[in-house]
Image: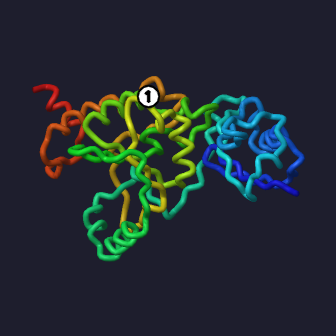
């Protein structure tokens, strides 16, 4: 029987269908090397498990019982400098990144067809509660990609792509807010990333639930505009200097004191924070 898998790495997908059930995990890694240039010892394959533990190199693929075209996420870096191997990401025209969000978003969100789409999603989407919401806490929804995690750079581990101060930020936020993790990807990837980053079972905070792409709607808008929180990109270059989450946790602490958020414009969060800190 042949084994077919899809490797996700650096924003690209690579299809491998030349292996059999008798081949080993190491044979798979060699195939991945020929497609990506990442050496087997530099590859970390997420989700290839035997009895809950990562599969060793000598394990036969047949024993992993992989469904055809199973997607496997890879962490790993080519030998050349990291900067050269940032793979171009095939942009999906249907999804507008939050960092390209529109000035005229108010007009967009009140359009009848969009309200109908939202109503349909609310009815059909099943939220799986991981931890019960707490009385009196507001809800903080955090996007994974570029906010908590640099999903386009290549690295040997998710930890390297994690935004600085992530756990301190979530610990601080959890004191005042219930936390929801959201991403425009599938729940399988959100789950894998959160486990890899040590978010899922962190002793210092809890995640209330997670939302995936099935909770999204698509909207059509005339143009794109402002950046609101600086995205965390090129993790290997910016890990040392990015302090955004640290500052953001101070802003969330400040506004948690307010009864009503409707008067806030989160776009000006830094201005609000500096005013408060200078009083």
The front one of 3 and 262 is 3
x, y percent for residue 47: 66, 43
The front one of 173 and 147 is 173
Q: Is residue 260 above or below residue 171?
A: below
The front one of 187 and 237 is 187
Q: Dot 1 surroundings within 10 Å: few (below 14), some, or many (20 or more)?
A: many
Residue depicted at 76% across the width and 51% down the height: 65
x, y percent for residue 22: 89, 47
Q: Is residue 100 left or right of residue 255?
A: right
Helix, strand or loop at label 1? It is loop
Q: Name the residue that disc number 1 marks.
A: 164
Q: Quick one: quadrant of the N terminus?
A: bottom right
x, y percent for residue 171: 35, 31
Q: Quick one: quadrant of the C terminus?
A: top left
Report whether residue 248 is seen.
no
Residue depicted at 66% across the width and 38% down the height: 52
Specify the color scheme. Answer: rainbow
Res 251 quadrant in image: top left
x, y percent for residue 50: 73, 40
Residue depicted at 24% across the width and 40% down the height: 269
Label count reads: 1
Q: Is residue 220 left or right of residue 137?
A: right
Residue depicted at 42% across the width and 65% down the height: 217
Report whether residue 119 is seen.
yes
């Amino acid at each position: 029987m042949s084994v077919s898998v899809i490797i996700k790495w650096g924003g690209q997908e690579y299809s491998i269908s030349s292996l059999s059930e008798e081949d080993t995990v190491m044979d798979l890694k060699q195939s991945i090397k020929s497609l990506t240039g990442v050496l087997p010892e530099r590859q970390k394959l997420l989700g290839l498990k035997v009895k809950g533990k990562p599969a060793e190199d000598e394990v036969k693929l047949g024993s992993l019982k992989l469904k055809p075209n199973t997607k496997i996420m890879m962490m790993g870096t080519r030998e050349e400098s990291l900067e050269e191997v940032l793979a171009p990401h095939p942009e999906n025209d249907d999804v507008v990144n939050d960092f390209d969000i529109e000035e005229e978003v108010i007009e967009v969100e009140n359009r009848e067809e969009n309200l109908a789409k939202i109503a349909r999603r609310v009815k059909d989407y099943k939220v799986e509660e991981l931890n019960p919401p707490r009385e009196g806490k507001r809800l903080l929804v955090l996007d994974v990609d570029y906010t908590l995690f640099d999903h386009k750079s290549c690295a040997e581990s998710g930890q390297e792509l994690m935004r600085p101060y992530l756990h301190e930020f979530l610990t601080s936020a959890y004191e005042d807010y219930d936390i929801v993790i959201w991403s425009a990807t599938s729940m399988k990837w959100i789950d894998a990333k959160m486990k890899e980053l040590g978010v899922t079972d962190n002793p210092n905070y809890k995640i209330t639930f997670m939302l995936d792409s099935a909770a999204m709607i698509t909207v059509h808008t005339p143009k794109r505009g402002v950046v609101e929180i600086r995205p965390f990109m090129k993790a290997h270059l910016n890990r040392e200097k990015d302090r955004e989450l640290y500052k953001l946790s101070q802003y969330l602490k400040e506004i948690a004191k307010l009864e009503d958020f409707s008067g806030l414009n989160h776009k000006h969060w830094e201005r609000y924070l500096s005013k408060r800190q200078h009083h």
